[in-house]
Amino acid sequence: MWLFSRKGASGFSASSTAEEVTQGIDGTGLTRASSGIGTETARVLALRGVHVVMAVKNMTAGREVKDTIAKRNPNAKIDAMELDLSSLASVRKFAADFISSGLPLNILMYNSLSAYGQSKLANVLHAKDLARRLKEDEVAITANSLHPGAIATNLFRHSNLINGIVGLVGKYVIKNVEQGAATICYVALHPQITGKTGLYFADSNVAETSLQANDNALARKLWDFTFTLINNCPNNT
């Protein structure tokens, strides 16, 4: 699949693949925990030596992904741990289990597909405010957000109309899964990102965001609302 695109300042573009943006990078010694980021992302990070811990709601599916990656790369370090993000009890159990494993946490990834537009805006705002708070507290942790792009996945399988559009114009505007995983892997591993925080990425480059996504007051409001919502959750379940 190819796209009308040109390389940005990073040297990559919308048509770059996850393997291309991580070529020559050694992630050995790093551990990454993630939820909802896809098989290709896990495969490429494992290929670069990262110990991948997939946080999954469906452990059967998680084990299948693990086995598939291991068959292609016998040296892959990849595990699946149960996590249901709709349950704070499950979140706490996952955190406790991960800590008990003794593994370091170098990279944390999270993706949400529900209420897509609003959740993506919330992700950008959260990353921005988290980056600000970490910087103010002089904590050496970075937080960034990204958009992988429009990707031809089985998310479209129930819509004949969308499938038809994908078939007609997909090669010009829609990424395949290898291209769709590129920005995630770029932000996770590429040395160009070292020390950069509070930024938004698309097509493996720093990108502009909407006015709403740049609203610092809205980011603080979302943070406070989320904090209150969690604390007021009955039994934190």
Image (cartoon, rainbow, N blue to C red):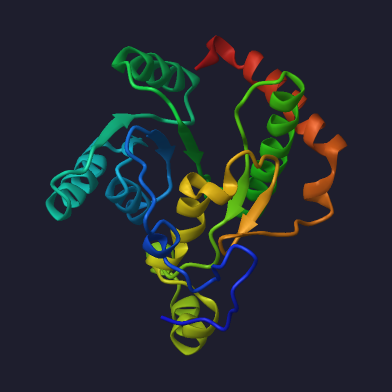
**Residue in the picture at 47% in, 31% down:** 85
Please determine whether, in this image, residue 134 is positioned above or below residue 33: above
Give whichever of 143, 176 is nearer the camera: 143
Please determine whether, in this image, residue 101 is positioned above or below residue 191: above
Where residue 155 sits, quadrant-wise, is bottom left
**Residue in the picture at 38% in, 69% down:** 157
**Residue in the picture at 49% in, 45% down:** 188
The residue positioned farthest toward the bottom in the image shown: 168
Give whichever of 147, 103 is nearer the camera: 103
Q: Position of residue 27 (x, y in %)?
A: 36, 42
Q: Is residue 174 left or right of residue 118?
A: left
**Residue in the picture at 29% in, 17% down:** 101
Quadrant for the N terminus in the image: bottom left
Where residue 216 sits, quadrant-wise, is top right
Where residue 12 sits, quadrant-wise, is bottom right
Q: Position of residue 79 (x, y in %)?
A: 25, 34
Residue 21 in view: yes
Q: Is residue 174 left or right of residue 80?
A: right
Please determine whether, in this image, residue 208 is positioned above or below residue 34: below
Q: Position of residue 53 (x, y in %)?
A: 33, 34
